[in-house]
Amino acid sequence: MYTHILISTDGSALAQRGVDHGLSLAKALGSKVTIITVTEPLPVLTTGDGAWARDLKGYEADQTKFAEGVLSGVKASAAKMQLEVNTAHVSNSHPASAIVETAQRLGCNLIVMASHGRRGIKKVLLGSQTSDVLVTATVPVLVIH
């Protein structure tokens, strides 16, 4: 049924619940697994004189180091379950877009991700990558709360 599952994580405890569920599902189904983490572009911050307040190379290096840590932790979780997984880090991208595009590019037929389940003004202020994925994905999306 689901032969290639894309599981997204941002390294948070909530995302880990989605990872754990996705890995368990993959093991039960014998599915191929790809774990994805996405790091966003450098926020444009300026000082009063218009100078950049952040160092682009330093930011990208920090984001890459963070993603490597997240993905190595997930690979360790998968290894404990005797699952072999592929990993993907998409940098400098909007998470929902990167998740959907990666699923399409790799031929995944299920996306698994966690959600806070925010509503109302909290959703508007904090955004929802899960909602964006649900709206744009062409494959089923399993949302873990």
Image (cartoon, grey):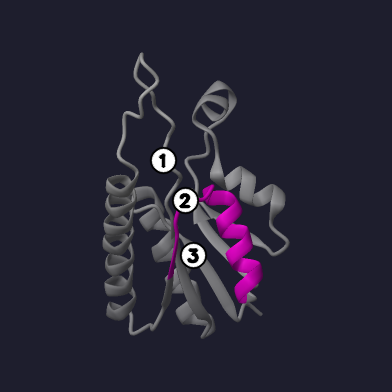
Circle 1: element type: loop
Query: Between residues 16 and 37, which one lies in front from this camera angle?
Result: 37
What main secondary structure does the magenta stretch of the protein show? helix
Local crowd at mark 1 within 10 Å, few (<14), some, or many (≥20)? some
Quick one: label 3 or label 2, which is nearer the N terminus? Answer: 3
Is 25 displayed left or right of 82 in the figure? Answer: right
The structure residue drawn at horizontal position 49% and vertical position 30%, both measured from the top left corner, is 126
Residue type, numbered disc 3: Ile
Reading the image, the residue beneath label 2 is 92
Residue type, numbered disc 2: Asn
Residue 73 drawn above or below residue 93: below
Viewport quadrant of the N terminus: bottom right
Reading the image, the residue beneath label 3 is 7
The structure residue drawn at horizontal position 51% and vertical position 56%, both measured from the top left corner, is 113
Question: Label 3, label 2: how many angstroms apart (C-alpha)?
Answer: 19 Å
Circle 2: element type: loop
Can you tell which of label 3 and label 1 is closer to the viewer? 1
Query: Between residues 80 and 68, which one lies in front from this camera angle?
Result: 68
Quick one: label 3 or label 1, which is nearer the N terminus? Answer: 3
Question: Label 1, label 2: how many angstroms apart (C-alpha)?
Answer: 7 Å
Q: Are marks 1 and 2 in contact (CB under 8 Å)?
A: yes
Residue type, numbered disc 1: Leu
Residue 96 drawn above or below residue 112: above
The structure residue drawn at horizontal position 59% and vertical position 24%, both measured from the top left corner, is 120
Q: Which mark is residue 42?
A: 1
Residue 137 x, y percent position in the rendering: 69, 57
Residue 110 x, y percent position in the rendering: 61, 68
Q: Which residues are magenta?
A: 88-106
The structure residue drawn at horizontal position 60% and vertical position 75%, both measured from the top left corner, is 106
